[in-house]
Image: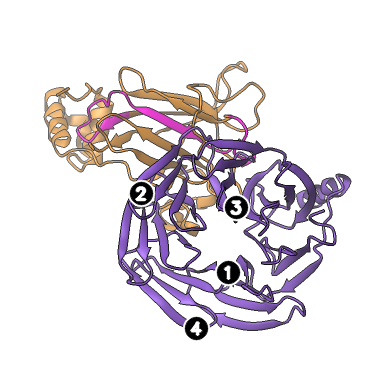
Chain colours: A orange, B purple
């Protein structure tokens, strides 16, 4: 059995706080050894598998493995999506394949080709990164979202979606509106969004980032 | 503005907009069927009514309130699908009689065989298709389907074959008696949303996301040919009783509210005969038993009727 991936201090703190092993206020006083003990306790409690959502009608098999979906000049706010594919013990899942697709800036899915569609293999650390644009809104399902289909040997296939906390659809109040119009089935799939101002040149535009870790269950 | 632009484009392309006749409805019709004698059209509507019209006069003959989740699944047969209790009640519309109650049937999609002896149900949560004996109400088969849920279920005319198209893009074909999977089509790259066997049972026709009509040999399930040219995702289709005309209805993937096309095809040659307009996504298409009329529901409070003899199919 592989050991859990070695995290940095920030990742250990995030895990401990998210599982209620540590309160946010005490973290600055912890030594590395104390933090490691708390982290091991949190790890032992296991990670909750990512919740499933529906596949939807717009999935297309056969997407190419491409990390950059945003072409020069594409309309839409640049978006970087990253995360890791792990099992419920926090271990790297080997051989995972991630199908990833979403509508373009105008809310239209590409049904003839593979724009804003990819099927990627996470790297040796289980990390995946996709450079794309913020999905648009469309009338039949007016919340921005990205579809995922993840397969891995020895694990249950997961179909899920990621939503955006900055989406005007939620009217600035996730607690109140997360289930509006029955679109998002799980509040935990609404991802915090980090906004970056960008650099001086056009190669470093303002952009948004979300981190979506995917936790698979054993088959 | 977009709607006006699309209408202008359709007009410029010589696509006619008006149906030959319309049956006016207080609710938006979903599934549409002609009666066996062709004299009436019935539809389950979004406002939880099933309505029946006289075709020749356009007069509303019957208006029945039904529970939410109820769909007409064949001429004169409707299914009440209750997701909370995982039950399906199947009713005879004319006789107003419950034909069967199926327990333990989580259902998002339903199909009934032509002889009314088998019902197929599917739910994306289960990743399976179930076949039920309509005489006993007992489950006969549980068939392992794909990961996305069924996007279309179709029985062959003799009831010996069941086809499930899945949102995972694959199509699976089973023998209904044994439950044996006899074919899995894995090379499609889009879900199939609509399907029918030709009336003689010799061909299976499916169409969907990738705008293409696929025609398979129904014995070997080898792909015979494809028809391209509709130019939109296809959400509904129907085949004429003589097997010579196919009609396909479209779906604009940006919103079901946008206008779309309805294409009449000559099946033997594969040529497009005529293109007409639908106001919104086509939900259902049906031929009259004599092949004279095509009925269409497409998100408006009416059922459009196209007279093939007067032009639409020529």
* Element class at badge 1: loop
Task: Say which residue appears at 60% left-offset and 82% top-offset.
Answer: B63
Q: Main secondary structure of the magenta part?
A: loop
Give the residue number, with chain letter if any, for mark 1. B46
* Element class at badge 2: loop
The subunit letter for the residue under badge 2 reads: B
Q: CA distance from mark 4 to mark 3?
A: 30 Å
The subunit letter for the residue under badge 3 reads: B
Task: Answer few, some or many: residues within 10 Å of disc 1's Cα (few below 14, many 20 plus, some between 14 and 19).
Answer: some
* Element class at badge 4: loop
* Element class at badge 3: loop
Does the segment drawn in magenta span residue A94? yes
**Looking at the image, is mark 4 or mark 3 earlier in the sequence?**
4
Give the residue number, with chain letter if any, for mark 3. B198
**Looking at the image, is mark 3 or mark 2 earlier in the sequence?**
2
Viewer-nearest of discs 1 and 2: 2
- Residue A104 visible in the current orientation: no
Disc assigned to residue B96: 4
Give the residue number, with chain letter if any, for mark 2. B127
Q: Position of residue B49 (x, y in %)?
A: 57, 76
Q: CA distance from mark 1 to mark 3?
A: 29 Å
Q: Position of residue B205 (x, y in %)?
A: 59, 47
The answer to whether dots 2 and 4 both sit on one chain is yes
Q: Is residue B234 above or below residue B78?
A: above
Q: CA distance from mark 2 to mark 4?
A: 33 Å
């Amino acid at each position: 059995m592989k050991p859990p991936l070695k995290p940095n201090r920030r990742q250990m703190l995030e895990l401990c706080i998210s599982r209620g092993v540590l309160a946010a206020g005490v973290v600055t006083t912890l030594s590395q050894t104390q933090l490691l003990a708390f982290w091991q306790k949190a790890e032992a409690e296991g990670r909750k598998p990512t919740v499933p959502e529906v596949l939807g009608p717009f999935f297309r098999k056969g997407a190419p493995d491409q990390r950059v979906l945003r072409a020069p000049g594409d309309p839409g706010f640049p978006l970087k999506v990253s995360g890791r594919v792990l099992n419920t013990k926090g271990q790297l899942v080997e051989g995972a394949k991630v199908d990833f697709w979403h509508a373009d800036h105008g809310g239209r899915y590409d049904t003839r080709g593979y724009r804003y569609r990819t099927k990627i293999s996470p790297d040796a650390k289980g990390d995946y990164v996709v450079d794309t644009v913020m999905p648009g809104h469309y009338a039949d399902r007016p919340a921005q979202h990205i579809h995922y289909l993840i397969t891995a040997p020895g694990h249950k296939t997961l179909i899920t979606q990621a939503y955006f906390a900055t989406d005007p659809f939620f009217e600035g109040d996730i607690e109140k509106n997360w289930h509006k119009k029955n679109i998002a089935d799980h509040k935990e799939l609404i991802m915090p969004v980090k906004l970056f101002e960008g650099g001086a040149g056009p190669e470093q535009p303002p952009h948004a980032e979300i981190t979506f870790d995917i936790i698979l269950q054993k088959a | 503005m977009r709607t006006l632009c699309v209408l202008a484009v359709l007009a410029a392309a010589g696509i006619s907009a008006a149906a030959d006749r319309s049956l006016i409805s207080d609710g938006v019709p979903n599934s549409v069927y002609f009666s066996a004698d062709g004299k009436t059209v019935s539809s389950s509507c979004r406002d939880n009514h099933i309505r029946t019209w006289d075709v020749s006069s356009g007069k509303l003959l019957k208006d029945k309130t039904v529970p939410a989740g109820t769909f007409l699944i064949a001429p004169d047969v409707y299914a009440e699908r209750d997701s909370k209790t995982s039950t399906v009640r199947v009713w005879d519309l004319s006789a107003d009689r419950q034909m069967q109650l199926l327990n333990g049937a989580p259902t998002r999609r339903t199909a009934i065989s032509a002889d009314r002896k088998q019902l197929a149900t599917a739910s994306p949560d289960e990743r399976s298709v179930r076949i039920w004996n309509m005489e006993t109400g007992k489950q006969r088969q549980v068939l392992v389907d794909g990961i996305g849920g069924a996007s279309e279920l179709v029985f062959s005319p003799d009831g010996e074959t069941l086809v499930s198209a899945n949102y995972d893009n694959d199509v699976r074909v089973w023998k209904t008696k044994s439950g044996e999977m006899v074919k899995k089509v894995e090379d499609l790259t889009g879900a199939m949303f609509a399907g029918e066997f030709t009336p003689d049972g010799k061909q299976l026709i499916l169409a969907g996301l990738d705008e293409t009509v696929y025609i398979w040999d129904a014995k070997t399930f080898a792909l015979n040919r494809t028809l391209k040219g509709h130019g939109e995702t296809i959400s509904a289709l129907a085949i004429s009783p003589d097997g010579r005309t196919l009609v396909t209805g479209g779906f604009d993937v940006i919103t079901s509210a946008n206008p779309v096309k309805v294409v009449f095809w000559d099946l033997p040659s594969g040529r497009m005969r005529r293109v007409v307009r639908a106001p919104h996504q086509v939900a259902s298409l049906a031929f009259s038993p004599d092949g004279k009329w095509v009925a269409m529901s497409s998100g408006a409070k009416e059922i459009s009727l196209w007279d093939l003899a007067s032009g639409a199919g020529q």
